[in-house]
Image (tube, grey):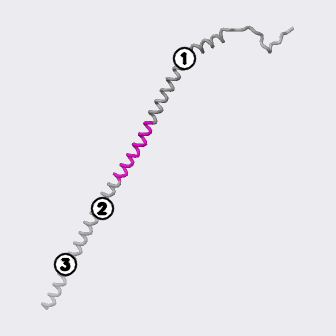
């Protein structure tokens, strides 16, 4: 009977050791999953930051070129306005004189379509 109880006792101890090993393996598995998740999140953050940096660089290049284009257009517009104002000042007096001459010099003539009623 003692040998039977020793065998049962050994089986119980073996079962307990197996259970402990199983729990330890589960703990290691959970720990490794957490570690893998943290590594993946770090990798994702690194990738996101890299792509965000590339995006900002491209955006600044595009926006920079747009601002230089708008400055160039603004300069051209101001130049054209100055040119038109100069042309206006230069030709205003002669155009006004021509206009007044046409309006004030009235020539009394009979219209070609007028038929004299006899």
Q: Nearer the viewer, mark 1 or mark 2?
A: 1
In the image, which disc is placed on residue 17? 3
Left or right: 94, with 50 as reference point? right
Whole-number angstrom distance, CA of label 3 to CA of label 2: 30 Å
The answer to which of 111 and 36 lies nearer the viewer is: 111
Residue at position x 46%, y 36% in the image:
69
Residue bounds of the magenta highlight:
48-68
Q: Secondary structure at mark 2?
A: helix
Left or right: 65, with 10 as reference point? right
Q: Mark 1: few, some, or many residues within 10 Å (few <14, many ≥20)?
A: few
Let me know if residue 80 is in the magenta part: no
In the image, which disc is placed on residue 114? none
Q: Secondary structure at mark 3?
A: helix
- Residue with the most extreme left position: 2
Residue at position x 25%, y 66% in the image:
31
Q: Quadrant of residue 118?
A: top right
Residue at position x 43%, y 36% in the image:
68
């Amino acid at each position: 009977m003692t040998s039977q109880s020793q065998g049962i006792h050994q089986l119980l101890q073996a079962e307990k050791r197996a259970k402990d090993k199983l729990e330890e393996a589960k703990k290691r598995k959970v720990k490794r999953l957490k570690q893998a998740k943290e590594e993946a999140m770090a990798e994702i953050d690194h990738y996101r930051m890299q792509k965000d940096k590339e995006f900002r660089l491209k955006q600044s290049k595009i926006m920079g070129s747009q601002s230089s284009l708008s400055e160039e257009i603004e300069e051209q517009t101001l130049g054209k306005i100055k040119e038109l104002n100069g042309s206006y000042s230069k030709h205003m007096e002669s155009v006004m004189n021509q206009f007044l001459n046409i309006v004030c010099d009235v020539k009394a003539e009979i219209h070609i379509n007028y038929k004299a009623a006899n």
